[in-house]
Image: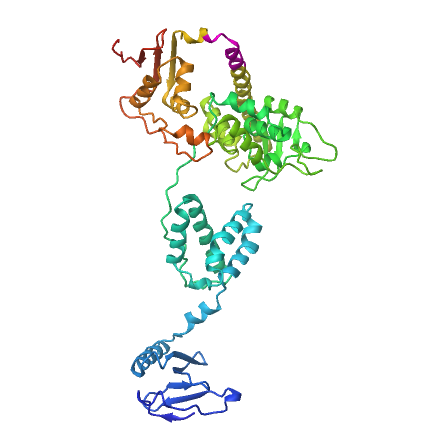
Amino acid sequence: MPRIKLRQDTVKTLPYVGVASDKTQCVYWDETFPGFGLRVLPNGRRGYVCSYRIQKRKRLAVLGRADVVTLEQARRKARSYLGQVSDGEDPQEMTDRIRASASVKALAENYLERHAKPKKRSWKVDESALNRFVLPKFGARLAASITTADIANLHAEIGQHHGYTANRLVAIIRKMFNVGRKLGLVPREIRNPATEIERFPEFKRRRYVTPIEMPRLAAAIDADMNEFAAHAIWLLLLTGIRRSEMLAAKWEDVDWEHRTLFVGKTKNGEPVLAPLSRAAIARLKMIPRLENNPYIVCGAIPGKPLIYLDAMWRRVRKETGLYDLRIHDLRRTVGSWLVKDGASLHLVGAVLNHKDQKTTAGYAYFQTQDRQKALDKHGKKVIYLATKRCSETRSNADSDPQDTEVTKMHTGRFAREELYDMVWSEPMTVLSKRLGISDVGFANTCRRHGIPVPERGYWARIAAGRVANKKPLPAQQPGMREVIRIRVDRRGQKLKDAGINLPNA
């Protein structure tokens, strides 16, 4: 290779020397700076290079194009590179690792195949999120080139309308990059781009079926056209097990003598012996058994279970007007009603299988008995309210309308949580008419006790199937009564609340 004294005025005029067909490399080495030179390609392009040797390996680093970087800038960069080499560091090591890293598409495929599918039951959720949001934007890029700003912008874009989805996506991306490090697809020196991203606020869902809503819900479930779906919803309401566990249950898993249901595949990965109340056993006996189908809840395909409850649930919500009620809220209903009936949190956790249970067979037997007793009481309450309220509704419909105009004396004692559930379960005008009180006075009572009421237009949005925000119940302030007493006179015109005497008209 030729050796000359490189100058800024001659850099652009030096010709290519060599056989172009053989792609012979042509480098003009600088006489004044050993290891620094100008490389000229057959097509006329030229760039500055720096040659060094590290760990018995000779390397050539490209410092920049000659039409972009000046000669003096290239020399300073070459001195920096050689300084790192003298300290035993390879200045191109990080660049090599980034280039050797997998693309985001390859990283996502390896994450799904080697981690999510073998270890997560919800791997389809991860796959859907990556295919919808990540791969269209970053699929062709190297995984090591993704920055925190890229993920933060994606998080903010999705979070404008779906905050919870944006938070879940960031968690999936963070886990994907951590797995990529272990698999060698992402350099360990690269910072995980999904860390230190501020999440959107999330509020714990506390929705459950109230005693007032139970009659409407029971009537709508029984009236649905899909018999097996109706049985499935009833069993979810009576047992508290998860939807996927109920739909996968088989007749052979039911122990009729000890009233238990064996659930072999739970969310926490361990099998559990779920107790069955007498109401649940009675419901199981009502379900027809189809020939050559081992599943309790059968679907339209012969020999297969029912896998889709959403269509039936949409019909139930439309019939009852409970548009904010989800199927998983039935599980919350079981836990909430058990706690209200005095069951301990430990017992409720055992009923709902919230924790891993590693106990001996004898202890598990007695624990199952306790859970059965709790569910027996719960099942009786569900059946009683469903039948009692429905009969009351029918009798009121058959009565003389003139008799209902004169409201009799009604005295009620309610906890703040009960009044809160009542005012958000149906319109204030309907509720106050049934209780025989003024809707204005009832609303004032709620406000005095810090109970939020639906804003104007809330029930219209619910009826239209639109999303309507439900205000959470604030904490009880000092001086507020725990039990609120509502008293109405015969004509339904005066209201006395918790010892506060309202002036007479």
Q: Residue 295, position in %: x, y?
A: 67, 34
Drawn side of residue 429 relative to residue 7, left or right: right
User: Does residue 110 lie above or below 444 as drawn?
Assistant: below
Q: Is residue 399 magenta?
A: yes
Q: Which residues are magenta?
A: 391-401
Provide the major secondary structure of the magenta segment: helix
Residue in the picture at 63% in, 26% down: 259
Single out the residue that lies furthest toward the right. 291
Residue 265 image position (x, y, % from top left): 60, 40
Q: Quadrant of the C terminus?
A: top left
Residue, x 61% and y 38% (percent of image)? 307
Please, which residue is most extreme toward the left here? 503
Across and down, in percent, residue 437 comes to 37, 14
Q: Residue at x 60, y 34 (%)?
A: 246
At x 74%, y 35%, the residue is 292
Q: Is residue 457 left or right of residue 327?
A: left
84 and 121: which is toward the camera: 121
Of residue 155 and residue 427, the one placed in the foreground of this image is 427
- Give the image quarter of residue 248: top right
